[in-house]
Amino acid sequence: MLAQLGSEAKLLAGGQSLLPLMKLRFANPAHLVDLNFVPGTSYVKQEGNRLRLGALTCHADIEDSPAAAAIPILHDCAAGIADVQIRNRGTIGGSVAEADPSGDWAPVLLTLDTEIRCLGPKGERSIPIAKFFLDAYTSALGPDELIREITVSVPPKGSGGAYVAFKRSAPVYASASAAVRLTVEGDICRDAAIFLGAVGLTPVHAVEAEAALRNNQITPKSMEAAAEAARAAADPQPDMRGSAEYKRQLVAALVRRAIEAALRRARGERVQLSHLYA
Ligand SMILES: Cc1cc2nc3c(=O)[nH]c(=O)nc-3n(C[C@H](O)[C@H](O)[C@H](O)COP(=O)(O)OP(=O)(O)OC[C@H]3O[C@@H](n4cnc5c(N)ncnc54)[C@H](O)[C@@H]3O)c2cc1C
């Protein structure tokens, strides 16, 4: 239908981003192609070492999924998106397709080995998440393509991840957020992935922050170095959520918290994590 209707058509999933834009007249599609009528598009299942999430799976179903619980950072993210109504309607596929710089899923999925499986008139293709987000609200998805499924590999033994955002209240986007995945061997951090949300046009890959941890012991000093490097990597815009400097400070604190929680999880502890609210 998308191919037939052309650029005047928009896909509709949960409508939690598209409908507000239509109400504000920022989007005015001539046709809506409602994906909710397509059966078998909402699921969370583990196959081998990969978790498969149907594009129409709503945030609340991921929050409650025993399969997704195997990767706690997914629960951190799903459980913290806005409020119950939005989590019951909004979908992971719609959220990723929207490529909103303040969206919660992008930084989280970037810390994991994630593939975006797309479907279009020419068939299926899989896009590694690192190549998916091109700019604010712009992804590698073609105009006649849709996201069919998102797959994530279960991180290796000794891994732990955590996602923490700072929000002014529940039903608003984060002022800043930090997603961290660590893989440890004894006292040494063998691998680290750190992505920052809402402090750039796309999620910011905090490469220097990762380098401060990788092949080192995680100590208060190395955590501080990682937090400082994240602060330097952030590229926030001042807006109603705060000044650029405030968001940089915030991101450093969030990275510290996320590293602490990820480390405890990597060591096998069960850690309940919640976003910070003003
Ligand atoms: C008040 C409010 C607060 C919110 N707070 C947060 C928050 O804190 N964090 C957060 O991450 N999100 C937040 N959201 C957004 C919410 O998570 C949405 O669910 C999400 O952004 C879009 O998902 P959707 O299913 O509603 O998509 P829709 O609104 O239906 O679609 C969004 C866009 O994606 C396209 N699309 C949808 N599905 C597909 C698909 N399968 N393939 C290709 N394109 C597709 C649509 O054409 C449209 O362009 C908030 C929304 C509201 C209204």
Image: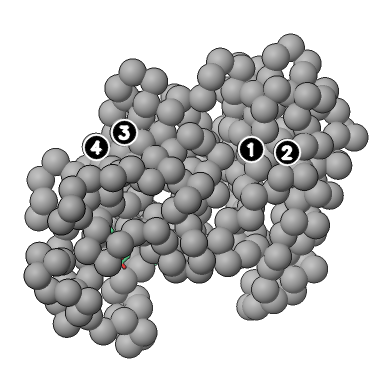
Image height of 265 relative to 55, above or below: above
Specify the quadrant of the image occupied by residue 29. bottom left
SS assignment at label 3: strand
Say which residue label 3 marks.
Answer: 52
Residue 244 image position (x, y, % from top left) = 74, 71
Along the horizontal axis of the image, is 247 left or right of 67?
A: right
Three-letter amino acid code at the position of disc 4:
Tyr
Mark number displayed over residue 193: 1
Q: CA distance from mark 3 to mark 4?
A: 8 Å
Q: Is mark 1 within 8 Å of ligand 1?
A: no
Q: In the image, which is nearer the foreground, mark 2 or mark 3? A: 2
Report the front residue among 32 and 175: 32
Of badges 3 and 4, the one in the foreground is 3
Tell me the residue at 19%/44% (across/down).
41
Q: CA distance from mark 3 to mark 1?
A: 21 Å
Q: Is residue 257 left or right of residue 65?
A: right
Rounded to the nearest angstrom, the CA distance separating label 2 from label 4 is: 33 Å
Alpha carbon of mark 2 to alpha carbon of mark 3: how far? Answer: 27 Å
The numbered dot on residue 14 is: none
- Check disc 3: other Cα within 10 Å, few if <14, some if 14-19, many if 20+: many
* Residue 167 seen from this side: no
N-term mark: 2 or 4: 4
Of all residues, the one furthest to the front in this rendering is 122
Task: Name the residue that disc number 4 marks.
Answer: 43
* Residue 228 on image: x %, y %: 84, 49
Determine whether label 2 and label 1 are within 8 Å by CB.
Answer: yes
Q: Return the residue at label 2.
A: 210
Kindly identify the residue that appears in the image at 9 percent across and 70 percent down.
4
